[in-house]
Amino acid sequence: MRRSIILFAAVLLLAGCGGAEPASAPSPSSPAPVAGSSWMDGFCGSLIDFAKIGDFRMPDFEQDDVASARKVMDEAFGVFAPGFDNAVTGLGKLGQAPSAEADAARESIVAALTPIRDKVLAAKAALDAAPKDDKAAVAAAAVSFRQIGSDINDMPDPFQQLETNVSLKTLAAQAPNCKKLPS
């Protein structure tokens, strides 16, 4: 689960919280930067719930206590499902990117997160469909969650290109949702 912390840090870099100089406000006769910062605002808005994954800590529970284990798994999927789903769905709904670099960043993040999102949603749906006291369903959810954690750890860093791209950092500095990402 340490990978989620790394992803969380990468989101912070995307948001330009690393000390990048804020760009000057665009003039009213300059719609391209406004459109770009609006797009980036949607980009960062799509990642707000995803950034919460970095704060999640799996609570301790007794292995033989099905109710406790179920509560913990429900809580975990309650953070991971919207985090991944809102990121993939939101990024997919963004309009025309302001640059080829921005579009490549979006595409790589969606490509990296989609298979994990699909596993999270499938595991959550299976657990939600099971009776609350179904020990086998809770055990299967725990196995799925461990695999999801492994997938996160093995995933290439989809944010790497955003760490060094000055134009994307500049747009992020102008986007209100980027400021909502944890710093």
Image: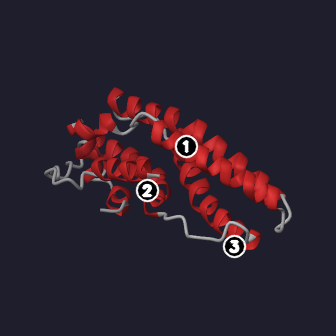
In the picture, the disc for residue 88 is: 1
> Residue 52: where, in percent of width, then height?
46, 61
Amino acid at the residue labelled 3? Ser
> Residue 139: where, in percent of width, then height?
73, 55
Crowd rating for badge 3 (residues with CA inside 10 Å; few <14, some 14–19, many 20+): some
Q: CA distance from mark 3 to mark 1?
A: 30 Å
Crowd rating for badge 2 (residues with CA inside 10 Å; few <14, some 14–19, many 20+): many
Front disc: 2 or 3: 3
Amino acid at the residue labelled 2? Ala
Outermost residue, front side:
64
> Residue 39: where, in percent of width, then height?
40, 44
Amino acid at the residue labelled 1? Val
* Secondary structure under the numbered disc 1 in the rendered image: helix
For the C terminus, give its image quadrant.
Answer: bottom left
Crowd rating for badge 1 (residues with CA inside 10 Å; few <14, some 14–19, many 20+): many
| Residue behind mark 3 | 68
Q: CA distance from mark 2 to mark 3?
A: 26 Å
Q: Residue at x 24, y 36 (%)?
A: 165
Whether tag 1 and tag 2 are in contact, CB under 8 A, the answer is no
Mark closest to the chain's N terminus, 3 or 1: 3
Q: Residue at x 55, y 43 (%)?
A: 88
Please state which of residues 42 and 143 is positioned toward the viewer in this rendering: 143
